[in-house]
Amino acid sequence: MSTSHTALRDLGIQAINSGGSTGSSWWSGRNDGSLLPSINPSTGEQIAGVYPCSPEDYERIVKESLEAFRAWRMVPAPKRGEIVRLIGQALREKKDQLGTLVSLEVGKIKAEGDGEVQEMIDMADFAVGQSRMLYGATMQSERPAHRMSEQWHPLGPVGVITAFNFPVAVWAWNAFVAAIAGDTVIWKPSPKAPLCAVAVQQICNRVMQQQGYAGIFSLFITDQPALADNMVQDPRLPLISFTGSVPVGRRVAAAVGQRLGRTLLELSGNNAVIVDETADLDMAVRAIVFGAVGTAGQRCTTTRRLIVHESRCEELAGRLVKAYAQVQIGNPLEKDVLMGPLIDQVAVEGYRAALDEIKKEDGQILCGGRVLSRTGFFVEPTIVRAQNHWPVVQRETFAPILYIMTFQTIDEAIQMQNDVPQGLSSAMFSNHLRHGERFISAAGSDCGIANVNIGTSGAEIGGAFGGEKETGGGREAGSDSWKAYMRRQTNTVNWGTELPLAQGIKFGS
Ligand code: NAD
C-alpha cells in the first residue's frame, strides 16, 4: 500500500498545483485569486494548495473544449471507446495511489478510497462496451417508399459539477459516458477535493497526449460561486450535470432552465431501510451498519432512517448499539479503522446542530452523539429514537446519524418511507414475498432505487443511478443513462418518386 507521500509523488501532486487544464500542453498559471488549500480532514492540516482558475482561464477552457468537440464528434464511437479503455488501464495502474489520495483528502477509509477508483475502472469498461451500442430505433412510416429512423448525435461540451464526497467516481460516471457519446467534458470539482481532480486530470492528460488529443477532458477548479455560476449560465454548454446538495441544485436547475439548457441533477437523499416482522436480522444489521456508518454518513445513499416493525425494534436497536460499539474511528488510512472524519468543521457544526434539535424534540439518543475532542473532524456514529415528521428527520444531515422509528402495518411503513421530500435510495428487509413485491411495485417506494434484502448504499454501476422528487430526477452510469449525453434526431427518407403529404393533404399543383 502506498504511503501518503509516495501516493502524492506518483500522482504528480506538487506543493502548489494549477487548477485548470485542457491537456498536457496547457495548465493554468498563477492568478490574482488566493491559493486554495487542500485540507486533510483527519488532521486539519494542509496537504497542498491549488491555484483556482480565473475568468480568463475559464474562457480558454470553453473555447478549447468547443474546438475539440468539433473534431471528437467525428471520431467513430468505438474508437472513442478505445481511448476511454486506455484511461481505464491507466487508472488500474494508479489505483492504489489514487485510492490513498481519496482517503487523505476526503477522509474515506482506504478500502472505500480504492473502491471508488475501482468504480471508475468499471465505468470505463462499461463505457467501452456502450460505445458500440448507441442504438437508435426504426419506425414504420405510414407513407409508401419512406424510411423512418432515429439516431443519436453528440451534444457538445458538457459541464460536470461534482460533490466532495465522491471526488473521483462521479466524474467517471459522467465523463466516460459523455466521451464515448462524442461530447467533451469540462469538470468543476468540489473545492474541498481539488487534489483528487488534479491527479485524475494528470492521468487523463498523459493518455490523451499519447493518443494525440487535447481538450476532450478539461479541468476547471474554482472556489468562487460566481465563477461556477458563469459556467452554469453558459449557453455553450448544452448540458450541466450537477451532483450536490438540494439548495445548490435548485439554483443550478433554475439558471440552466432560464436558458432552456439541459440539467442532469443528482441531489441529496434521505434514505430509509424498512425491517419487517419476517426480516433476517443478521443480514439487516450488516447492511444497516454499512449503510449508516460507511463514509462517516457522508454518502448520498447513506441509511438515515430505519423503519422497524414494532415487534423487532428492541432486538434490532440492541444489536445495532452493540455493532456501533465495535466501530473503530480514526485515521482512515490505518488498518482496522472503519470510520474516518467528517469533511470539515462546517460538517461537524451540522452534526451538532442536528443533535441540539433532536434533544429539543425529546429524541432518545441510544448511542453516540458526541464530537470527539481530538485533532481532525471526528464525531461518533449516532442512533436516535425519533419520529418521521420531525423537521430534523425530514432533511439530510450529512453525518452518521440514524433515526429509528416503528410501524405496525406494511402500508404504514411504506408511507413513512415515502413521506420525506427526497427520493434517492430505499430498502426493505423481509422474507415475506408479498411485502417485498409490494415495496417495489407502483404503489411502493417512490425512490429511484428500491432494494429488497440489500441496503441503501453500494449501488452497482450497471443500473441507472439517481432519484426522484428533491433528489432531482437525473440518472447516471448504467442502463440507458447514455441518452442524457446525446441529442436524438428523427430522420425520414423518401426513396420513392412521389411526395405524399401527411394526412392525405393535397397542396398546390
Ligand atoms: P454542495 O452542493 O455544497 O456542492 C456541490 C458542488 O456545487 C461543488 O462542486 C460546489 O463547489 C458547487 N457549487 C457551489 N455553489 C455553486 C453555484 N452557485 N453554482 C454551481 N456550482 C456550485 O454539495 P457537497 O457538500 O459537495 O456534497 C454533498 C451533497 O451532495 C449531499 O447533499 C449529497 O447527498 C449530495 N450528493 C448526491 C449524489 C447523488 O448521486 N445523488 C452523490 C454525491 C453527493
Image (tube, grey):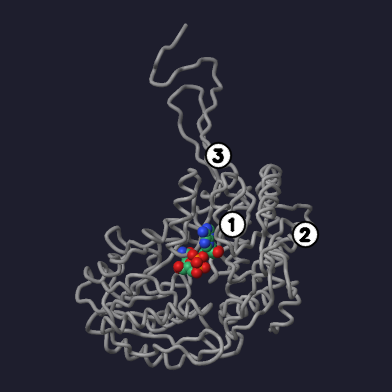
Q: Nearer the viewer, mark 3 or mark 1?
A: 1
Using the image as rendered, state which of residue 73 and residue 350 is in the foreground.
Answer: 350
The CA span between labels 1 and 2 is: 24 Å
Identify which residue, 440 or 239, lies in the foreground: 239
The one of 214 and 428 positioned closer to us in this rendering: 214
Some atom of ligand 1 lies within 8 Å of the CB belonging to the residue at label 2: no
Residue at 26% x, 81% y is 361
What's the residue at 20%, 73% (across, down)? Answer: 409
Q: Residue at x 30, y 58 (%)?
A: 442
Using the image, determine if residue 437 lies above or below residue 367.
Answer: above
Measured from the top left, where is residue 239 in percent x and y? 54, 49
In the image, 194: left or right of 244?
right
Q: Amino acid at mark 1?
A: Leu
Residue 382 picture location, percent across and down: 39, 85
Lower position in the chain sequence, tag 1 or tag 2: 2
- Position above or below: 194 against 359: above
Question: Residue 256: x and y, percent?
Answer: 49, 49
The answer to whether marks 3 and 1 mark residues whose Cβ atoms lie closer than 8 Å is no
Q: What is the number of the mark on residue 227?
A: 1
Residue occupied by mark 2: 24
Mark 2 burial class by Cα count in 10 Å: few <14, some 14-19, many 20+: some
Q: Secondary structure at mark 1?
A: helix
Amino acid type of the residue that numbered disc 3 sits on in the rendered structure: Gln
Q: Secondary structure at mark 3?
A: strand
Q: Which mark is residue 151?
A: 3
* Amino acid type, residue under disc 2 in the picture: Ser
